[in-house]
Image (cartoon, grey):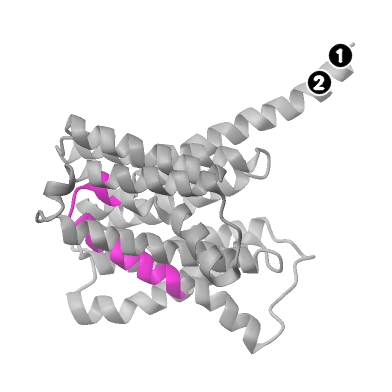
Amino acid sequence: MSVPILSAAAPMREQRMALACLVLGGIAIGASPIFVRLSEVGPVATGFWRLALALIPLSLWSGIARNHDEAAPAGLRDYVLLILPGLALAIDLVAWHLSLHMTSVANATLLANLAPVFVTLIGWLVFRTAVSRIFLLGLALAIAGVVTLKGGPAALGDGELLGDAIATFAAVFYACYILAIGRLRSRFGTNRIMIWSSASAALAILPFALYFEGNILPHSLYGWGIVAGLAFISHAGGQVAITYALAYLPAAFSSLTLLLQPVVAAILAWWILAEAVNPLQALGGAVVLAGILVARRG
């Protein structure tokens, strides 16, 4: 009688481990805005270190989990295709890191999570992907939530509007990154794509960090610890944990990380940065999250 019990328990253990990794991955990525705000260097330089330092654990993970059956890039065209997601990621990270210094952590994180909505919109415009009524309902909810988050139509002209607009701009380019990754995923493995996209994004950001911010080196061990935490915990750790989890759980569970990230960011911003969230902002954030969740189902 013990054999069937053990064989049934093994998948359950894997699913519990996958769920734990999914939650931890969402928390790790949700903490990234706090690292950005606490960084000793500018937002563009912080984006560079986020990507460059993440290459260390990503390369180690690639060596451990090497897939010898995976196809290698066949020529210049393949290398260009592997670089393109990194360029979109570079624009996304620079815009989002800038927005974190121009608006609240809660606003920037919520608006950056509009990326799934833009994925569908871009897919419809470029690839003529069908758009359902459920998606349109979710889009309407998300827009209503953003307006509520800002305090209603009368508050849309306040000083944080530019920061919110830049966070939304970041969401558009993260959507481009997701679409580019989706096109590559059928040919190349996750590790190869993550390493190429992270490396190309870091190289794209570096000259702008040097030009606009000058010294990009943190000036203390604390500063290095902040950028290392952003790279190792949020960028590499969070992505690897979620990638592992989605190998064992239905894709719908990815919505859990979508909901976790802005909630974790808002809680940590309240605890560490003393950023209060008023009831109207909380209501707007809940409506935005509901809209995103409905849009994803559509």
Amino acid type of the residue tagged 2 in the rendering: Leu
Let me know if residue 30 appears in the view. Answer: yes
- Front residue of 55/212: it is 212
Q: Secondary structure at mark 2?
A: helix
Segment tinted magenta in the rendering = 87-108
- Front residue of 135/15: it is 135
Q: CA distance from mark 2 to mark 1?
A: 6 Å
- Front residue of 264/219: it is 264
Q: Quadrant of the N terminus?
A: top right
Amino acid type of the residue tagged 1 in the rendering: Ser
Q: Callout 1: few (<14), some (14-19), or many (20+) C-alpha neighbours within 10 Å?
A: few
Q: Is 91 colored magenta in this rendering?
A: yes
Say which residue label 2 marks.
6
Question: Can you tell which quarter of the image residue 287 is in?
Answer: top left
Instruction: Kindly indicate whether the residue at mark 1 contacts the one at mark 2 (C-beta within 8 angstroms).
Output: yes
Side (left or right) of 121 relative to 92: right
Side (left or right) of 223 relative to 5: left
Q: Is 225 colored magenta in this rendering?
A: no
Say which residue label 1 marks.
2
**Vertical order, 78 against 276 (above or below):** below
**Where in the figure is residue 136, as x and y percent of width and height?**
47, 49
Number of numbered discs on residues: 2
Q: Residue at x 88, y 19 (%)?
A: 3
- Front residue of 193/40: it is 193
